[in-house]
Amino acid sequence: MSELGAKKSGGLSRRDFLKLMGAAGTGLAFAPFVPFGNFMPNPRQASLEKVPVTLPDGKHANIKSFPVNHAEIITYPATGDSALDAEAFRKWQFIRLPEELGGSKSDPSALRAYSMICLHLWCLWKYWPDDNKKQGECPCHGSIYDPSTGTAFEGPASLQAPPSNTLARLTLEIDSDGFVFIMPPKFDVHKNGVIGYGRFA
Ligand code: FES
């Protein structure tokens, strides 16, 4: 398949793969816990199902109790194996947006779940809810992400061409009791995105 064909089908071209490997070489210095071997570049071997959003305290996230302008780390896809579930590529920032970005609504538009793998060199970024910030920040080289879109607007990740300036994202759903679920994702740059590589916004 041609490179263009590979991209259109959602696969990674050889050049993209080499770029990822180059990033991994540097990223390893910052994230040596990522087991690149059987996990590159995404958890394709995992069974991707609709599952509850499980918070770090083990509770099922509910829009009625999850605070506005707040984030927690969630794991997807979880396997039940603590070593696998600790992998950085399974970690997502589950965010309820600040009020000014629609976070007080009780529908899925108030929520986001973005891969925590920074698109620059794969450090882990996090959401800062402080008054003067309310944005995602990567501690390594200062990439800043818009919590509403997952697109970097400052720092080295913002200088990368799409799709490598916008984080992979999970699709969320809320049931009639307010409980939040993750819908089965498609790890494709034109759909939910590719973890550590990006998504066309
Ligand atoms: Fe460089 Fe995040 S890894 S800004």
Image: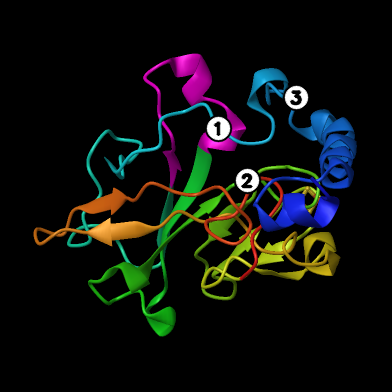
State how far apart marks 3 and 1 are (Cα): 18 Å
How dense is the environment of label 3, judged by Cα within 10 Å: few (below 14), some, or many (20 and up)? Answer: few
Q: Is residue 30 above or below residue 190?
A: above
How dense is the environment of label 1, judged by Cα within 10 Å: few (below 14), some, or many (20 and up)? Answer: some
Q: Residue shown at 22%/72% (left/top)?
A: 106
Q: Amino acid at mark 1?
A: Pro
Furthest residue in direction left, as rendered: 177
- Range of residues picked out in magenta: 73-90
Mark 2 element type:
loop
Residue 195 numbered tag: 2
Are the two marked residues, 1 and 2, in contact with CB atoms closer than 8 angstroms?
yes
Look at the image and say whether residue 197 sits in the magenta stretch.
no
Furthest residue in direction front, as rendered: 1
Residue 27 numbered tag: none
Q: Judge whether residue 141 can be spotted in this image.
A: no
Which of labels 2 and 3 is toward the front?
A: 2
Look at the image and say whether residue 78 sits in the magenta stretch.
yes
Q: Which residue is mark 3?
A: 32
Q: Which residue is mark 1?
A: 43
Q: Residue shown at 27%/77% (left/top)?
A: 105
Residue 49 location, quadrant: top left
Mark 1 or mark 2: which comes first in sequence? 1
